[in-house]
Image (spheres, rainbow, N blue to C red):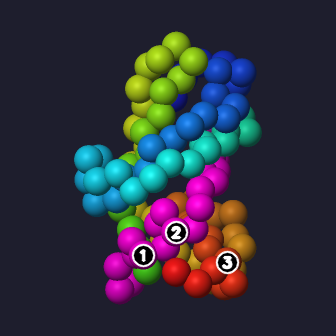
Amino acid sequence: MVSGTDRDYKALVVRIAVGNREKLKGTGILYIRNLNERVCVFTAAHVISDCFDINGEVYLFLDFYDQKYDNHLIEGAFDKVDQKNANERWVYIPDSYNS
């Protein structure tokens, strides 16, 4: 669980790993609107577009450090969706992106 104040976590650089924490695929920006609410990760589509399995799922590890240099990890299975949607653990890649 991430703790602290809203100011500590507004936008942070996040490491994106696939399958296990050591398989770094790239980086992104972790945006937290308010603590204990849904977060968004913005990254280039090529970072994760080829990582989904046949069922459209991927297990991601999102590592980041807060302003006090404490390390945090968000991990879990995420689903790829074909339309913009704000549901938890969904990844949206625009149809116009060609991997």
Q: Secondary structure at mark 1?
A: loop
Write the residue at 35% across / 86% down: 54
Instruction: Please give the range of residues in magenta.
Output: 35-55
* Residue bearing the label numbered 2: 46
34 magenta-colored: no
Contact (CB < 8 A) between labels 3 and 2? no
Q: Nearer the viewer, residue 42 or 8?
A: 42
Tell me which amino acid carries mark 1: Asp
User: Residue 33: horizontal and vertical position, in percent?
Assistant: 73, 39
Give the number of callouts: 3
Tell me the mark number nearer the camera, choosing from 3 and 2: 2
Q: Position of residue 50 (x, y in %)?
A: 42, 75
User: What main secondary structure does the magenta stretch of the protein show?
Assistant: loop
Category of crowding for the residue at label 1, using alpha-carbon neighbours closer than 10 angstroms: few (below 14), some (14–19), many (at least 20)? few
Q: What's the residue at 48%, 27% (across, down)? A: 65
Location of residue 98 with respect to 64 vertically, above or below: below
Q: Which residue is mark 1?
A: 50
